[in-house]
Image: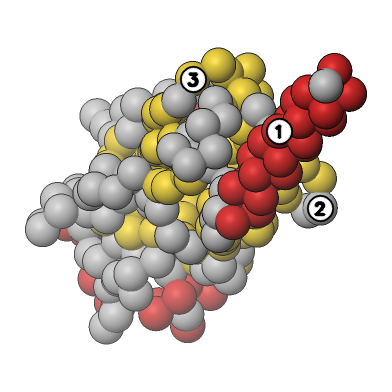
Amino acid sequence: MKMNRLFLILAVAIATAFTSCKKDDDIVNPEPTIDFKGGANYTSTDVTINTGDEILVGFNAAYNMETGEELTNFKLTLTSNNIPQIIMDSTLKNKTFSTDVKITFPDAGTARLEAKITDKAGRTAAVSFNIIVEQAGVKVVRHTNVELGSWNDDIGSFYSAKENLIFTVPQAMENQAKVDFIFYKGVTNMNTITAPDDASLSTIPSFRIDEWATKNETRFVLTSMTAAEFDAIGDYYEFTEFEGNSGESKVINLEDGAVVKFRTQAGAYGLIKVVNFYSRGDMGVMDVIIME
């Protein structure tokens, strides 16, 4: 009798264990679930952005009600250039999990963002999307130590920003369409950068501007940018457009370190940094950045 009873107990235990295992095996999808949060503010699919942009991603995860296994880990990984970076790695003991994450992308390239949820049994589920990060702004070229002189100097006052060419008065007469701006040191306005179409040039007979048939309408805005910020500009820069008819035909009383934004008649944007507008003589040195 004791042997029969022991056999019965063992049989029931084995049957129970078998039934339990078979129950888990019968579950078609025993993994936990994870999904992106939707909505206008969230990113949840493949996206193309600019350098410096920030995206908001959100996740909702839940345990599998059939297995009853609680969530134990949430991991968010950003892989760029085959190098994974763990953005978030959270230990859990919950049936549900929700989080929002903001991520900024300072460099151009491609990346993949993956979020993985793991339950107590080691089962996982994941969601992901790809990010293409494009360089913000436009390609620019930099011309350094551009030295402009007076009307009677060997170094001319007339400058073509696109071609980085300096013209004397006779040369400018032959290249009117190329001249974007002119430098002079006035009695009242002191260090001045002006467009060829500015009326003040008629008061400087030596420039012979009244003889020109083509006078480009370059426009200028004195900025609050510092010289250091100008120097920090790399191969790309995001110019803000002039609104409507904003911009002046000249900027006056310029001092060392000033930064001026300009737009050529052809629509190319650029920046001028005053390096040294000497206190004596009609000479000036500047750095120029312009759209390629």
For disc 3, the marked residue is 94
Compared to 118, does 154 lie above or below? below
**Count of residue discs:** 3
| Kind of residue indicated by mark 2 | Asn
Residue 122 location, quadrant: top right
| Kind of residue indicated by mark 3 | Asn
Q: Percent position (x, y) of residue 165?
A: 60, 66
Q: Residue at horizontal 40%, vertical 47%?
A: 36
Residue 265 location, quadrant: bottom left
Figure quadrant of the C terminus: bottom right
| Secondary element at image label 2 | loop
Q: Mark 2 or mark 1, which is nearer the start of the sequence?
A: 1
Question: Which mark lies nearer to you, 3 or 2?
Answer: 3
The Cα–Cα distance between marks 3 and 1, rounded to whole angstroms, is: 33 Å
For disc 1, the marked residue is 12
Q: Percent position (x, y) of residue 221?
A: 27, 42
Work out whether residue 228 or residue 238 is closer to the camera in this orientation and state it.
238
Q: Are marks 1 and 2 in contact (CB under 8 Å)?
A: no
| Kind of residue indicated by mark 1 | Val
Q: Percent position (x, y) of residue 241?
A: 27, 55
How many neighbours does mark 3 have within 10 angstroms: few (below 14), some (14-19), or many (20 or more)? some
Q: Residue at horizontal 48%, vertical 42%?
A: 66
| Secondary element at image label 1 | helix
Q: In this view of the protein, can residue 13 be seen by the observer?
A: yes
For disc 2, the marked residue is 82
Q: Mark 2 or mark 3, which is nearer the start of the sequence?
A: 2
| Secondary element at image label 3 | strand
Q: Percent position (x, y) of residue 110?
A: 65, 58
Compared to 230, does 167 lie above or below? below
Work out whether residue 236 or residue 150 is closer to the camera in this orientation and state it.
236
